[in-house]
Amino acid sequence: MSRSGTREQELLRGRTLAEQGKCQDAWEIVEPFLEDNPNDGLALVLATFIMEKAKRLPVAYHLAKNAAALVPGRSVPWTNLGRCAMDLWQMDEAESAFRKAVMLSENDETRGSNLTNIAAVLIESGRFVEAETPAREALKISPDSLKCRSNLGFALLGQHKFEGWDYYNTSIGTEKRPELKYADEPRWNGDHNRNLFVYGEQGLGDEIMFASMFPEAIRDSKKTVIECSAKLMGLFRRSFPGAAVYGTRWTKKRNWREEHRNPEFSCSSGELGKFYRNDVAQFPGSAYLTADPERRIMWRALFDHKKKPVIGIAWTGGIQHTGEKFRTLTLEQLHPILKSVDAHWVSLQYKDAAQEIAEFKVLHKDIDLVQYPWATLTTDYDDTAALVAELDLVVCMQTAVAHLAGALGKKCMVLLPKRSQWRYGTQGDTTPWYASLSLYRQIKTEDWKQPIHRIANELARDFRRPAATVQAA
């Protein structure tokens, strides 16, 4: 590799290559500098950025820590450390690093960027009240920044301040909330009696939650086309007969009927909030999904045969970038709940849990816990919905099945991590989205004993009755 040009020029060229996704080429520039001097702070800053781009997050994190230690008087190493720590869900460290970066910021632009990062950390940590201040400060510096505006939206909605919808919706068109259109129609402005295309967004739970506003959108539109994940198509078609529903959200080709190819406006499902959910009183909280009646009959026949309570349970949720590590329990941790009542426990895990269940039952042979894979490990959520509809109760981690239970009107006890999402607010044991959900909040991060024992005690109280009585109820 040529070492021509100044050190700063070469490192800048390496960063440009990394921004273009050419991480190997960028590494070939920075590596010789680090071979000459492993403690070259600026080279470590670039190495951090390259490893971030390459998704080598643990490596990036340790490079960032070294860079911050070697160049402590500049903001960039601390910003990098904050970003890497945040990617690994080390939120306390991320917040501390970003606050140092704010103090060291060389100009308003850098300061605003780091205030935005602080707001994002606080939002991911469920600290919405605290997040509002840095979000507003950042927005004063960068009033046109979509990230600043969407952060403020999350902070406000997490406090049930529904003026947050306008800020939240500025994130439409970003990587997390891509904007969809059928042709070149404009975004919906709320006009009634028009042809409307509504598309699902984010994860399966978000699609289900935002679908609670479909009845109002269908009522106010001349013709409504709903695009959702294929997994939800059957369930949504039955539940919203006044709309045309297509499961083409993740496909490139839309095989829609001709009469549905003329929307006058398009709108993401989350965007409906600014039209229909501007006060807690506007949240009906009632059931709005309809499970397949024939599949329900099959489950009812099986569960009647059990002659005891039938309770669904799910103990993990999310993926790495949505806080999976804080939304994961083991069956052993849930043992107080599982032993609290003689029930037929049904796994609602969306990943195969057969081996985990088998290993648990070796130690706890008295626990009647099963997995029905044809109902939960399926590409058709209608299978899962019919099962959940016939359960006596659901106990679960913050995960998509909580939304399903709430949308079906099924009583559901939700274990909520301290770092919870905006839709669950900051306090209280209910959410306006679903009347049938009860929230059991974690008081201290990584300590689940208190909410688990609360649920166990309530189950022991509520199901302390003869099996025949439970069956007849």
Image (spheres, helix red, strand yellow):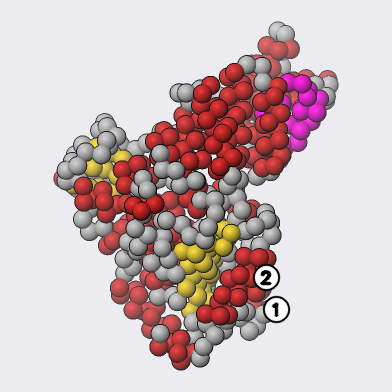
Label 2 Cα crowd, 10 Å radius (few <14 / some 14-19 / many 20+): few
The residue mark sitting in front, 1 or 2, is 2
- Residue appearing at x 77%, y 27% in the figure: 67
The chief SS type of the magenta part is: helix
Label 1 Cα crowd, 10 Å radius (few <14 / some 14-19 / many 20+): few
Counting from the top left corner in percent of width and height, residue 112 is at 58, 24
Type of amino acid at the residue the image marks with label 2: Glu
Q: Nearer the viewer, residue 433 or 281?
A: 281
Q: Which mark is residue 135?
A: none
Q: Nearer the viewer, residue 320 or 109?
A: 109
Read off the magenta span: 61-81
> Which element is circle 2 on?
loop
The verdict on residue 64 being magenta is: yes
> Which element is circle 1 on?
helix
Quadrant of image for the C terminus: bottom left
Counting from the top left corner in percent of width and height, residue 341 is at 57, 81
- Distance, label 1 to label 2, CA atoms, is 10 Å
Counting from the top left corner in percent of width and height, residue 45 is at 71, 25
Which quarter of the figure has residue 285? Answer: bottom left
Q: Nearer the viewer, residue 59 or 395?
A: 395
Which residue is outermost to the top? 5
Quadrant of image for the N terminus: top right
Residue marked by disc 1: 363
User: Is 55 displayed left or right of 158 in the figure?
Assistant: right
Type of amino acid at the residue the image marks with label 1: Leu
Could you tell which of marks 1 and 2 lies nearer the N-terminus? Answer: 2
Counting from the top left corner in percent of width and height, residue 47 is at 71, 27
For residue 172, above or below residue 237? above
Residue marked by disc 2: 332
User: Is 222 displayed left or right of 272 in the figure?
Assistant: left
Is the residue under label 2 in contact with that under label 1 (CB below 8 Å)?
A: yes
